[in-house]
Image (cartoon, rainbow, N blue to C red):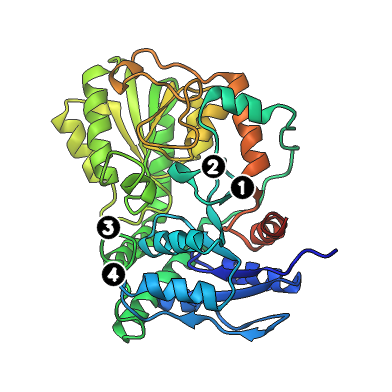
Amino acid sequence: MPAPVRRFLFLQGPPGTFFFQLAQTLAQKGQEVRRINLNGGDEHDWPGPVADRSGTHRASPYRGTQEGWPLFIDRYLRRSGITDLVLFGDCRSMHMTAHQMARLNGVRVHVFEEGYIRPNWLTLEREGVNGHSPLPHRPQDILAAARGLPGPAPMPPIGASLGRRARDTWGYFGHMLLGAVTLRYPFYRSHRPGSIVMEGLGWIAKYLMRGRQAAKAEVTLERLEGRSYFLFPLQLSSDYQIRVHSPFSSMRQAADYVLASFAAHAPHETSLVIKEHPLDATLGGWGAYVRDRARALGLGDRLIHLAGGDLNTLAQGARAMVVVNSTSATFALAGGIPVKALGRAVYAIPGITDEQPLAQFWAAPMPPDEALYDAFCRVLHRHCLVRGGLASESATRILIANAVERLVG
């Protein structure tokens, strides 16, 4: 007996046409798809109708207020016969409302997110991701869940281009701004803090400075040779990992906390490398902040700012890594490098990350339990990782093929 046809509703995806291409592939596989656009960026990333077995369907725009959204999405789910809701991230206010209404209506929820293990993977979980993930969090439960599961087979790396992701991001937010100023979506408010215009100017400055920053990063990396350093990879302040799943309201606040602790408690022969997020387009960057804090805390050249460099290589050379809750921690954990997580994260588990207070961590960081981390990775690969990426056409094709299999399986 054939499996029943399902009807997938797509809300906001990552910048770019990944969700549109995924919907087209689902339709080709005999499923039905619908879409609601919430702003001009959504329109730009969903460039046309999708034909499925029930007909050809254009995206439905929602131009109402935040207050009107709960009743609208509840009515849409029921009247359209939606069986599955697909989101990227589960903390945007309109996604949270849609998620809750989907539950009330018995609709399955599928949440994409950046990969828990990188590169070459994206996260896809039922019901929630990151701090909302249904994955087990007790060591004994992880070991039990991993029993009998194979590890991932060795595979070649997937192509990636930071320029592609920057282009997709710029295109999305540029059209989101256009949709607002032309009053096509007069009530939409971005889930990202700050000004879209200022972020756009930041991207222009980042592009113009890319050669100089690369040369500066090379010099900084040479300085690190032979030094004992801790690595502190930054996250985006717009990331809900910071705003919802950590004790901090911004990445700057988290950095203040980490730097003050390092100055007070870290061994004097160690340095702290502050690694910028590659998609951070904050106007002015982090360089001036790091220089100011180094002077104020008396750290001198022990505090090192880095706007480039390979994160995996940096992690493997570090004495230990401190993160708020970035998935970049998995680069260190995979190499047996100690990690201190300050916020909620799927990998923040006793025996995997260091449970000591940060003040004690600097002096005696504890490495992860190899067997437990291996079990954790096998559970991730079995239940919530899909191979592929967003930074190249080939990576997106691989991602779509694997995501479709997971969604309809």
Residue assigned mark 3: 283
Q: Residue furthest right?
A: 1
Please indicate, yes or no, whether residue 17 appears anywhere in the rendered image. no
C-beta proximity under 8 Å, tags 3 and 4: no
Report how far apart the C-alphas of labels 1 and 2 lie in the structure.
Answer: 8 Å
Report how far apart the C-alphas of labels 3 and 4 lie in the structure.
Answer: 11 Å
Q: Secondary structure at mark 3?
A: loop
Q: Secondary structure at mark 4?
A: helix
Residue assigned mark 1: 121
Of 295 and 223, nearer the camera is: 295
The quadrant where residue 98 appears: bottom left
User: On the rendered structure, is 171 left or right of 152?
Assistant: left
Image quadrant for the C terminus? bottom right
Q: Which of the labelled discs sits on residue 62, or is there none? A: none
Q: Nearer the viewer, mark 4 or mark 2?
A: 2
Of 41 and 164, nearer the camera is: 41
Report how far apart the C-alphas of labels 4 and 2 lie in the structure.
Answer: 30 Å
Q: Nearer the viewer, mark 2 or mark 3?
A: 2
Residue 315: x and y, percent? 49, 30
Inspect the image, locate mark 4, and give the three-letter code of the amino acid beneath it: Val
Q: Secondary structure at mark 1?
A: strand
Of 64 and 43, nearer the camera is: 64
Q: Which of the labelled discs sits on residue 116, or is there none? A: 2
Report how far apart the C-alphas of labels 1 and 3 lie in the structure.
Answer: 30 Å
Report how far apart the C-alphas of labels 4 and 1 lie in the structure.
Answer: 31 Å
Going from the N terminus, do you reach mark 2 or mark 3 first? 2
Q: Residues within 10 Å of mark 2 (few under 14, many from 20)?
A: many
The quadrant where residue 308 appears: top left
Residue under the image location 54 percent in, 23 percent down: 139
Q: Which of the labelled discs sits on residue 197, or is there none? A: 4
